[in-house]
Amino acid sequence: MGTESSPKGTRRILVCICGMAGSGKSTLCKKLAEKYGLKHYSGGDALKGIALEKGYRKIKRGWWESDEGMRFLKERGSVPALDEAVDEMLLGLAKKGNAIFDSWTMPWLLKKGFKIWLEASKEKRVERISKRDAISVSEALTALNEKERQTKEIYAKLYGFMLGQDFAPFHLILDTENLAADDVFHVLCLVMDNVVLNEVCACEWCIKA
């Protein structure tokens, strides 16, 4: 992991990046973690780990939109303890600080941290997922609609927020509709440098060492 612009002093930075499927959050989290020397934690990866333990297979990029991913999503809806276990783990890791979270729950569950929402239309996200997973646009749209419906139900029942509709926790909402991935990364680097890591502002986003 790189340390090009590692956080300084005793401040322990927390950043959450959130957005619906196809918004690019996972790729951006990894790139920002590498650039700024932060630990990267993914709620989706943690849930995939649980899926592996439960006997699910063929877990790869685009798995959540697959038939197997959809079956696991349905199981999560009936067994809330699966999501609760992941969120408890992520909250524990957050106490260490200097971390960036790719998570649909941490923006609401964490009391501290700088929280970013990546916005894009469903049409744009479907287009990205279709290209990413090498499936048709209609297949991507069907999978996305069902995934989002079930995911929203899970978090509404568990925590009372509506994913994709409740933006109260976020400090920045960035419209990525017409931005290339490199452009979004550049914008978020400016935010990191001038807001999150700014000596004057940082106390609001960090936890004490």
Image (cartoon, helix red, strand yellow):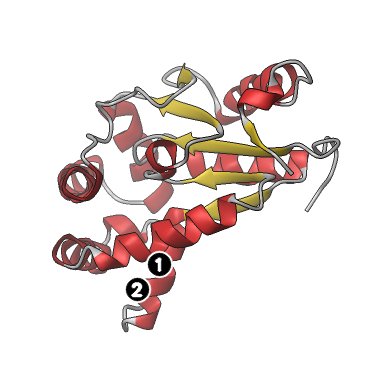
35 left or right, relative to 16: right
Disc 1 is placed on an element classified as helix
Disc 2 is placed on an element classified as helix
Q: Which quarter of the picture shows residue 122?
A: top left
Q: Amino acid at mark 2?
A: Ala
Residues at marks 1 and 2, CA–CA distance in whole angstroms: 5 Å
Query: Which residue appears at 40% of the width and 62% of the height?
Result: 86
Within 10 Å of disc 2 (Cα), the crowding (few <14, some 14-19, many 20+) is many
Within 10 Å of disc 1 (Cα), the crowding (few <14, some 14-19, many 20+) is many
Q: In the rendering, at what x and y percent does residue 54 appear?
A: 31, 81
Tell me, for residue 15, which label it has, or none. none
Q: Nearer the viewer, residue 134 or 164?
A: 164
Query: Which residue appears at 76% of the width and 20% of the height?
Result: 198
Query: Which residue appears at 34% of the width and 73% of the height?
Result: 51
Q: In the rendering, at what x and y percent does residue 74 appear?
A: 16, 63
Residue underneath mark 1: 48
Q: In the rendering, at what x and y percent does residue 33 appear?
A: 68, 44
Whether residue 58 appears in this view of the structure is no
202 left or right, relative to 117: right
Q: Are marks 1 and 2 in contact (CB under 8 Å)?
A: yes
How many numbered marks are there?
Answer: 2
Q: In the rendering, at what x and y percent does residue 42 appear?
A: 50, 54
Q: Nearer the viewer, residue 106 or 147?
A: 106
Query: Which residue appears at 44% of the width and 27% of the height?
Result: 118
Residue underneath mark 2: 51
